[in-house]
Amino acid sequence: MQFSEETKERIARIIDVSRVAIHYGYLPLILYLGWSQSTPRPSLIRFELLATPTD
């Protein structure tokens, strides 16, 4: 099957956008799924208090 140059460029652009979306979205998705599926659900406020540095 032969593709035109425009089709090849569109496929390449879609692949590039998909790579970026997977790269930046994978870890937040895993964290969200772990947070939403755990019992009892951890508090986000408590997490923020533990994550902030204290001087």
Image: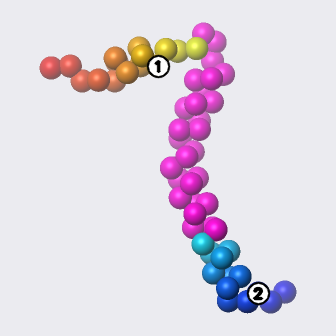
Position of the N terminus by quadrant: bottom right
Position of the C terminus by quadrant: top left
**32 falls in the magenta region:** yes
Horizontal and vertical percent position of residue 5: 67, 89
* Rendering quarter of residue 36: top right
Horizontal and vertical percent position of residue 32: 58, 30
Magenta segment range?
A: 14-40
Q: CA distance from mark 1 to mark 2?
A: 49 Å
* Rendering quarter of residue 11: bottom right
Disc number for residue 44: 1
Q: Which residue is mark 2?
A: 3
Taking the spot 58% from the left edge, 63% from the top edge, the residue there is: 17
Disc 1 element: helix
Disc 2 element: loop
Horizontal and vertical percent position of residue 25: 55, 46
Taking the spot 57% from the left edge, 67% from the top edge, the residue there is: 16
Mark 2 closeness class: few <14, some 14–19, many ≥20 residues within 10 Å = few
